[in-house]
Image: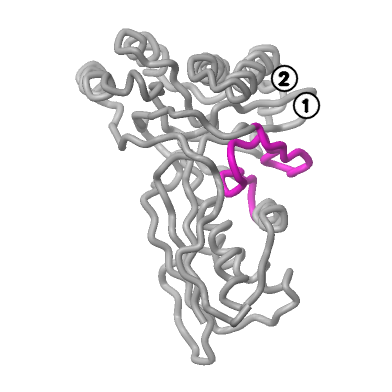
Amino acid sequence: MKAIVRCPGSCGELVQGTAAGMNFLVTCPVTVYSQVSVELSTERKTDRQAGDKTLQAVRRTLEYLGLPWQNVEVRIESDLPLGKGMASSSADISAACLATALATGHRIDPQAICDIALAIEPTDGIFLPGITLIDHVSGKVRRPLGQPPAISLAIFDAGGEVDTIDFNQRSDLALLNLAKEPQVLDALQMVEEGLRTGDCALIGEGATLSALANQTILFKPALEGIIELSRSFGAIGVNAAHSGTVIGVMFADAAAKGIGACVAEIRRQYPDVRYFTQARLTSGGLTVVEAPDYGQ
């Protein structure tokens, strides 16, 4: 039996840091996706598509459901680049969890998927509905913040790759996060209020503050310049991958007509920064593309 599940990736995070020492991030799911198919069979199959983390997700899901390991073929079709802060692993892992459950005729809720994903690596909550505040390391906090207003993003790659596990094991990370907590908490308050009221500008302001505060942890040379330049084209703010390389220039949809000109000017002034794509902020969550009919 076969099931196919789709998950959005992220453009970094709207906010990330610590609050009283607790790790957290606010998700930034966007309309760039990973799609995972899981097929169970009595025949032996050799999978050459999925990485170790995704296969771990399949195995752990079967264990959670009380099922034995089965012959399995996992295939991933993804538009999310690796090591850039677009939650490629989190998208693959979470989609694989649900696809595995559906292929075996079972259901699994988002919180159980979150537990499985966190057992594999620090996890972005893009598979949770809406915009979510999540402790991405321990999962102790998972708080929905609401639905996103209409925001478009021009996504850029500042270059390089960042390994999520290595980043979160940095010996200096806790002290650096502590030092920037005041700015991060201000940023969180802005984003929460912006989501509550539908105020795109406030969300952009909070995301920009969090991105700038993170420069002491993962410096992006072009960030400050892109922030200043994008304002002249009507951008509401700039967010960043706090443990990755992507930068998102944010526009309220009413001002989205300025995106093309803004992208062209950023590419002209910052040739080392690669333009990736344009996307929209979207609700997190998993979408079932195909599932077996077990007569339920």
Tell me the magenta residue range: 120-145
Q: Amino acid at mark 1?
A: Gly
> Badges 2 and 1: C-beta atoms under 8 Å apart?
yes
Residue 156 picture quarter: top left
Instruction: Give the residue displayed 43% in from the left and 54% down from the top.
Output: 34
Q: Is residue 125 magenta?
A: yes
Name the residue carrying label 2: 178
Residue at the image position 57 percent from the left and 16 percent from the top: 213
**Magenta-colored segment: predominant secondary structure:** loop
Viewer-nearest residue: 24 or 148: 148
Q: Quadrant of residue 181?
A: top right
Q: Is residue 216 visible?
A: no
Q: Nearer the viewer, residue 208 or 259?
A: 259
Query: Where 103 sits versus 15, above or below?
Result: below
> What residue is disc 1 on?
21
Location of residue 255 in the rendering, given as x and y in whole percent from the top left corner: 33, 18
Q: Secondary structure at mark 1?
A: loop
Q: Label 2: state its secondary structure.
A: helix
Q: Position of residue 5 (x, y in %)?
A: 49, 62
The numbered disc on residue 145 is none
Q: Is residue 135 magenta?
A: yes
Q: Is residue 82 left or right of residue 156?
A: right
Number of numbered discs on residues: 2
